[in-house]
Image (tube, helix red, strand yellow):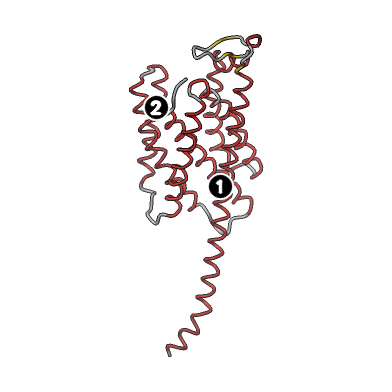
Amino acid sequence: MSTFDRNTQAPYAAAGTRAEAGIDQGLRSYMLGVYNYMTFGLALTGLFALGTLMLAVTSNQADAVAQLPNGMMLTQLGVALYGSPLKWVVMLAPLGMVLWLSFRIQSMSASGARTMFMVYAALMGISLSSIFLVYTGASIARVFFITAASFGALSLFGYSTKKDLSAWGSFLFMGLIGVVIASLVNIFLASSALQFAISVVGVLVFAGLTAYDTQQIKEMYYEGDSSEVATKKSVMGALRLYLDFINLFLMLLQLFGNRD
């Protein structure tokens, strides 16, 4: 009887193993797509940040329109981007676009979602170009690699842990709202003590969000999704992780960056 049981159950066990292997392979491909989109977005942001800096700053006295206290000389474009009311547009445009993209991505095509994500990453690069006027290049590079290592470890934890992180969601969301409100208030107060507190709390919030979002993105995977739906999910996931990375980087830069 025991031999009969093993023989009848064997085909079902084999089929289950094959199905699980198929899901694992599909999940790996899906997550790889998420990370590829995120990485490409970060690279695009970096390129646009450096490109904007090269156009906004000059070492040629003849091309300079204004000089900063740290000795950097700005071109006409630099003065427009960093010294005129246009700076508020440059600063707030990525925020407005990410809100618009979050609400509209469901109704977009997969190719449209990809395109808008790349446009957003480029706008973010233009906005972030100003950090090169404040912090030294060496400290920006150092903090970037610290962020990359931290992000990788946290995302790996979120992907591999068996612990359900969904309970973190409401706590992290409230922390995020607090960081945003405090940051807006500090634009007018310009308090170094408040900025330090915002940075410390921000690091904790975005570290938690990296692990939480990775697990949530993983759970969004469904083997039966069409190629169109799977691509849109990958772009949505990439946007969430991209924002976690950028904000974690900025918070760490405020804590450990060396100012010019």
Quarter of the figure with the N terminus? bottom left
- On screen, residue 219 versus residue 78, left or right, reads left
Q: Residue at x 49, y 24 (%)?
A: 136
Give left or right: position of 182 versus 35: left
Which residue is labeled 1 in the image?
34
Type of amino acid under label 1: Val
**Above or below — where is 201 with respect to 60?**
below
Give the left or right position of residue 152, taking residue 84 as reference: left
| Residue 225, x across and y down, in percent | 59, 55
Gap between marks 2 and 1 measured at Cα:
29 Å
> Comparing marks 2 and 1, which lies closer to the viewer?
1
Of mark 2 and mark 1, the one earlier in the sequence is 1
Percent across and percent down for residue 70 are: 50, 14
Q: Position of residue 83 (x, y in %)?
A: 54, 13
* Residue picked out by circle 2: 181
Where is residue 81, by image quadrant?
Answer: top right
Residue situated in front as seen by the camera: 58 or 198: 58
Question: In this orientation, which residue lies closer to the viewer: 252 or 238?
Answer: 252
**Placement of 54 over or under 45, stated as above or below:** above
Under mark 2, the amino acid is: Ile
Secondary structure, mark 2, is helix
